[in-house]
Image (spheres, grey):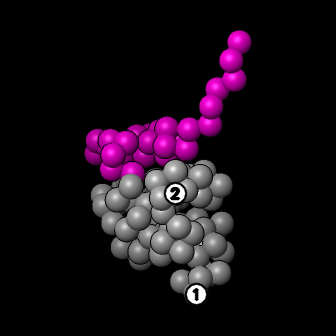
């Protein structure tokens, strides 16, 4: 029996699919993580329902640094009302 590999992209996609009727593709995740821009329901689910550890792992796999992730969350918080206390603390480390 093999152990399952942790797939942060699959976790993020699952959270978005559970919260939104708007279709999402794996390829869409980079733009959401790197810019904090996109469909509001996708942003709220990604940054509101996915924990910081998973988002950090996903960002790392996509080549997105911590500051960019924090800035993307701050944008999503402002434009799409994404809310996550853990990410608020993370973003505050960068003055966001």
Residue 49 can be seen, yes or no: no
The residue positioned 33% from the left and 66% from the top of the image is: 37
The residue positioned 44% from the left and 42% from the top of the image is: 13
- Per the image, label 2 sits on a secondary structure element best described as helix
In depth, the one of 41 and 91 nearer the eye is 91
Numbered badge on residue 59: 2
User: Of discs 1 and 2, which sits in the foreground?
Assistant: 2
The C terminus - image quarter? bottom right
Whether label 1 touches label 2, CB < 8 Å = no
The N terminus - image quarter? top right
Q: First in sequence, mark 1 or 2: give its number.
A: 2
Viewed as shown, does residue 89 lie left or right of 42? right
Locate residue 30: give its quadrant.
Answer: bottom left
- Per the image, label 1 sits on a secondary structure element best described as loop
Q: Please provide percent x and percent y for residue 54.
A: 60, 51
Residue stretch rendered in magenta on the structure = 1-29
User: Label 1, on which residue?
Assistant: 95
Viewed as shown, does residue 2 lie left or right of 74? right
In depth, the one of 21 and 92 nearer the eye is 92
The stretch drawn in magenta includes residue 22 = yes
């Amino acid at each position: 029996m093999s152990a399952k590999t942790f797939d942060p992209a699959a976790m993020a996609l699952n959270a978005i699919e559970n919260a939104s009727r708007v279709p999402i593709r794996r390829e869409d995740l980079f733009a959401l993580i790197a810019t904090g821009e996109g469909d509001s329901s996708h942003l709220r689910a990604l940054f509101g329902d996915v924990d910081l550890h998973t988002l950090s792992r996903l960002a790392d796999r996509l080549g997105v640094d911590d500051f960019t992730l924090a800035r993307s969350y701050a944008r999503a918080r402002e434009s799409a009302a994404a809310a996550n206390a853990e990410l608020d603390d993370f973003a505050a480390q960068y003055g966001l």
